[in-house]
Image (cartoon, rainbow, N blue to C red):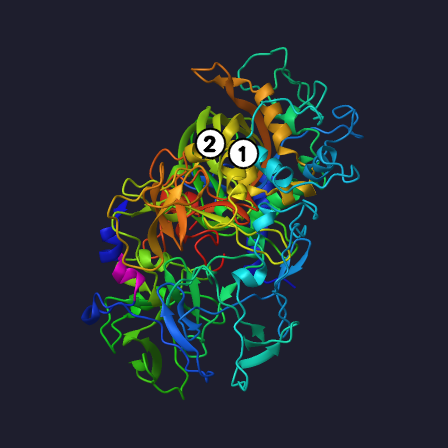
Amino acid sequence: MRQIVGLIGVLAAAFAMLPAHAKNKQYTEDYVREPMPRGFKVIVAEFEGPVYADANGKTLYSWPITNLRNGDAGEQKGKPTCDDHKYTENAGLMSPYPGGLELPEVETRPSCTDVWPPVLAKPGAEPVGKWTILERKDGRKQWAYDGYALYTSVLDRGPGDVFGGSELRGTSEAGAQRKPVGPPPNVPPQFAVRTVATGHLLTIGATGRSVYYSDHDEPGKSNCDRKCLHDWLPVLAPETVRPQGEWSIIESSPGVKQWAFRKMPLYTRALDTRGSSLEGSDVPGWHNVYTQLAPPPPEGFTVNDTHSGQVLGDAKGMTIYIYNCNDDAVDQLACNHPDTPQAYRFAICGRGDPALCLKNFPYVIAPKGAKSNSHIWSTMYIDPQTGKKATRDAAGALHVWAYRDRPVYYCARDKKPGDIECDTFGEFNGARNGYKAFWLRDDFGGNAGGSR
Amino acid sequence: MQSYHSMKPALAGLLGCALGAATAQAADSPLRGGTIGYVLTHKNVAIWQSPDGKVECPEGLNDGPREQFKTLYPPDAGVRYKFVETQLEREGQIWNPTTEPEPKLHFKEAQGTTAIGLNLDGKVGPNDFTSPEGEPGIDNQMYRVLGCVDNYRGPDGSYRHFIQDYMRKFNYNRFLVELTNVDDLTNDDDVDVTLYRGKDPLMVDTLGAYTPGSTHRIDFRWGKSFIYHLKGKIKDGVLTTAPADVTFPESQARGVPYLSVRAWRVKLKLTPESAEGLMAGYTDIERYYNSLGQNWSTHHRSYGAEPMTSEYRSMRRNADAYPDPQTGENTAISMAWEIKFVQAFILHEERGEQAISAVQGASAHSQAAGE
């Protein structure tokens, strides 16, 4: 177990691309400056990186069509379907259960547009670049990006909030989820950026292989000798390429051009066997390259080894869990937030019994005066009997830690640091209605993002 | 036409087969310096099946989640069902199982007296089975639970298929066995057996068959909890190990769960190219049940008609070992798996400072290693 100060100190160097001369500087991801209609802007969010936002700073989302077990949900390009219809029954999109079942809290269930207000185009607005204007069924005009209709989320309260969806979380097992929309990262064509739990990981686009840099090198100079080159392969740059922004080219040996990012020469690792690998960072002096780091958790949290990688733990190393839920109606609304129906979670954690839930999956209590230095971590008061938000002075209210505006939990079955007894616990392996450990690194599966 | 250089290994393979285990440390044998490794390629829950299934499953196979749901909530009952009282009720029961009766559901346990497995307690008890070869005292009460569940039955039970699929695709499941201190692969009454989790893919030939001779790195980074040192002996080419409590990874790629088995042991027919036989022990019920759900969602279990809540009750009912000190209820159930390995070279360190175990051991026996 490592203290999170280690995470901030030691892993700050590992998580971020921090050459010696720029320690403690938090980099943000550079992005392609695309033509954009008036009234919109780019905000570099702490975890998601550059996202488009409306004039009020609210993040924009799309809802790409997703193939679920019994059909599709989401939107095709050019065809917005999120409307003001209030669905009362599930759609049976997730096998093996049938559709036609009355949804929880049906009397107060919001419509899709109650939760996802469409981003409307003002009269006279003109399309520009990837930004186009669609006509909704009700005749109103709606902005679209890359063909997909745009929405904001009622969960986002201010600029930089991205609580409606994430690039990290979401396989089809989790339902058809909304994703934040942003400009492409400003990386040369042979590279790609993948969102993983620890940040935006730089990879080789064609292969998915991770890109590394070394403390043994110097800004603008490779010191990788013959022995080093046995395991570390320089990322070669095309002959005609020119430096731009954070990207430069060094001549590592006569006639051999090698990419450098933020001045440091780049390599792949010969022994990596899977995409988005973090294994090379186990070699002393070598680090994965990130265009942007994930914000660290609040002070006192720890990183703990499991039998497949690393998970986030509390100060004593006990694993932190995230609850995931997407409902099964046509509009696929989230059910993992304290403002949404809690019947889903109560079923999994305690067969409908809030007291059993509290015993099996206790909330992670935040100390009085606990502070977070990021949007993505916060504290909130929860009524454990209802699972919903409570006021500070409400009887029995618990002051708990929250990630992405949702409480985080323990698993009572875990007995020691690194135990993950409740990982993939619930419907569709914890992705659809259930719990997953807060993975930071998974060397075998895809739990921490990237690819398997 | 085959060149001399390409013929040599083929000839060596033929020699190896012809001489078999008797030439334990012949020049080209993978048994080098008293060490040989194997990697697991096949693992199936041991399910004995009569030709028509009528002996062990006279009432037929069990209903799965989809069929049970229809039984509990008939679609033609004229009822407007609520999500909370149906789907969530069922999932709540799955994730919080009890032993309360399921009056509307009927679970069919395997019948008869024949089962595949090992005699774990050295006794012949009233609930024990007789093996297909006639050995009495077989402890495999999990067969009662899973014997009539389509998921596990051959030739094409869904779990049976996918566990092989993910054995190949998912390195998390890589299970290595290394024998050391081996004087003779046919008879040796004292060998050391070490279990590891590897981190490399299985090697297949052009027809998709697993081939011996591949190299596997040990996962020392995350797999420490899967390393066990056991004692074993080889008699007439069959390896048996002393019982030990072990855990091993078993995942269908959606999560990373594991199984925990008490008094685990193997009985494996060894050759220089392969190992095949059984592993058995007393499986921790709670871990097995949770691992099943963590691996295999209700949707996936519907493929193979596997009713988890009914199985839980059956597991608890048939549990036969490790009583809880407070309640006296057994917490584990006897179980067996059919397993196959191919020979593998087990690499103990990363490249740069690497040492293939066999070669490392062979350094003191350079002639035997044939180098």
**Pointer 1: residues within 10 angstroms few (<14), some, or many (20+)?**
many
Image spot of residue A202 (x, y percent): 39, 68
Residues rendered magenta in the picture: A11-16
**Residue in the foreground of this view, choosing between A307 and A135:** A135
Taken as a whole, is the magenta stretch helix, strand or loop? helix
Q: Chain of mark 1?
A: A
**Residue in the foreground of this view, choosing between B207 and A373:** A373
Q: Quadrant of residue B7?
A: bottom right
**Residue in the foreground of this view, choosing between A102 and B162:** A102
Q: Chain of mark 2?
A: A
Query: In the rendered structure, are the residues bearing label 1 and label 2 in contact, judged by CB atoms less than 8 Å apart?
Result: yes
Residue furthest left as drawn: A21
Mark 2: secondary structure: helix
- What amino acid is found at the position of numbered circle 2 in the picture? Leu
**First in sequence: mark 1 vs mark 2:** 1
Q: CA distance from mark 1 to mark 2?
A: 8 Å
- Determine whether B224 is above or below A68 in the image: above
Residue under label 1, please give it: A351
| Residue B66 visible somewhere in the drawing | yes
- At a point 47% along the width and 41% down the height, the residue shown is B37
Q: Which mark is residue A356?
A: 2
Q: Which mark is residue A311?
A: none
Image spot of residue B339 (x, y percent): 58, 36
Does residue B219 appear to the left or right of B58 in the view shown?
A: left
| Residue A285 visible somewhere in the drawing | no
Quarter of the image with the N terminus of chain B is bottom right
**Pointer 2: residues within 10 angstroms few (<14), some, or many (20+)?**
some
- What amino acid is found at the position of numbered circle 1 in the picture? Arg
Does the magenta portion include A254? Answer: no
**Residue in the foreground of this view, choosing between A119 and A61:** A119
Does residue A329 appear to the left or right of B176 in the view shown?
A: right
Does residue A183 appear to the left or right of B98 in the view shown?
A: left
